[in-house]
């Protein structure tokens, strides 16, 4: 059990470190994101509820602040082992809440059910509803069980299947590594949906009230077809579920290498920060600089001496 927990933690850490590494390689500074995120003229509409935009942004930034607490208060490396248990939850919710603010700014309704929200995000990416940029625009669909998945970017499927989950991201093909993240996430989605369908009684034998043992090709393809394309947002949600429910013990069973503990936390912190800045850049363009910075100033006053996350970013940009 201890060895299994250790390997799981190392795999999650590697995925996070790799994603963070590639984001930083693509966008050395936040201004590099700001320069490429441009809303189209047809989307440049007047927001009808700026107060709701503010409310969800405040909730998002407060979640990010709690995520950043270990660095703000300089708690030291020993605390990060415990902070990592909840860091995926805080990171995901800060992004989820920020995206709700974006939906309101675009005069769309909030989507508070996570499964529906993630399906909608994939739909927005596919339809280019908002100016999604790499890596927030990459998608995977199709049945991974039969190695029939597809990606909206060029990648060698054979290399994905042979790539180790513990490879060094800086030494492998970036597209293959990113596809590996999406594919493993989609595989988990398919497994979860299969289990749910069986629990709901969709696959019961005629003679006995038990799940079918034979879960064949037709059923697997049907399950996959019921799942929206998988995005990086799905990966962050899956990580949130696994740390919060399914694999919570990986943070406490046995010893953890200090470098892995640090990489896990700071990679997730960086991914969260960059993802928020990406979403906030769209919001700012929708509501206008004056209103957006007015919201920032009010949050700044409420937050006192807080200088991590949103405030630090806004001072530079």
Image (cartoon, helix red, strand yellow):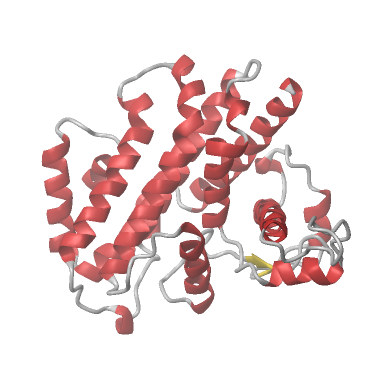
Quarter of the image where the N terminus is located: top right
Residue displayed at 74% across by 28% down? 4
Q: Is residue 98 left or right of residue 164?
A: left
> Picture coordinates of residue 143 (x, y %)?
76, 66
> Picture coordinates of residue 58 (x, y %)?
23, 48
Front residue of this view, candidates 235 and 266: 235
Q: Can residue 267 be seen in this snapshot?
A: yes
Q: Can residue 29 be seen in this snapshot?
A: no
Q: Is residue 172 left or right of residue 119?
A: right
Is residue 78 positioned above or below 30 on the image?
above
Residue displayed at 84% across by 61% down? 215
Residue displayed at 69% across by 72% down? 225
Residue displayed at 34% across by 74% down? 39
> Picture coordinates of residue 253 (x, y %)?
64, 19
Q: Residue furthest bottom?
A: 42
Front residue of this view, candidates 234 and 269: 234
Count numbered badges in the picture: 0
Is residue 74 positioned above or below 230 on the image?
above
Q: Is residue 198 left or right of residue 139?
A: right
Q: Is residue 198 left or right of residue 121?
A: right
> Picture coordinates of residue 208 (x, y %)?
84, 59
Front residue of this view, candidates 100 and 14: 100
């Amino acid at each position: 059990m201890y060895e299994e927990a250790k390997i799981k933690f190392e795999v999650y850490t590697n995925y996070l470190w790799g994603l963070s590494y590639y984001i930083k390689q693509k966008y050395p500074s936040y201004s590099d994101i700001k320069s490429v995120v441009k809303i189209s003229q047809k989307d440049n509409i007047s927001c009808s509820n700026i107060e709701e935009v503010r409310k969800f942004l405040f909730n998002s930034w407060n979640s990010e602040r709690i995520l950043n607490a270990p660095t703000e208060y300089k708690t030291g490396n020993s605390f990060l082992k415990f902070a990592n248990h909840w860091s995926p939850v805080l990171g995901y919710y800060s992004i989820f809440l920020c995206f709700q603010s974006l939906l309101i700014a675009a005069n769309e309704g909030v989507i508070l059910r996570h499964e529906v929200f993630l399906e909608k995000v994939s739909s927005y990416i596919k339809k280019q509803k908002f100016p999604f940029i790499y890596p927030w625009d990459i998608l995977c669909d199709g049945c991974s069980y039969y190695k029939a998945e597809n990606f909206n970017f060029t990648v060698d499927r054979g290399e994905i299947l042979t790539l180790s989950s513990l490879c060094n991201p800086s030494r492998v093909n970036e597209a293959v590594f990113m596809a590996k993240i999406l594919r493993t996430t989609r595989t988990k989605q398919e497994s979860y949906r299969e289990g749910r369908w069986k629990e709901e009684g969709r696959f019961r034998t005629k003679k006995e009230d038990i799940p079918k043992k034979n879960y064949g090709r037709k059923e697997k393809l049907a399950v996959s077809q019921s799942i929206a394309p998988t995005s990086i947002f799905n990966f962050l949600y899956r990580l949130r579920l696994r740390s919060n429910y399914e694999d919570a013990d990986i943070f406490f069973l046995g010893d953890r290498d200090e470098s892995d503990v640090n990489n896990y936390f700071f990679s997730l912190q960086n991914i969260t920060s960059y993802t928020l800045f990406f979403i906030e850049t769209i919001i700012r363009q929708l509501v206008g600089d004056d209103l957006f910075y007015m919201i920032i100033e009010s949050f700044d006053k409420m937050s006192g001496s807080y200088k991590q996350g949103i405030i630090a970013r806004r001072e530079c940009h």
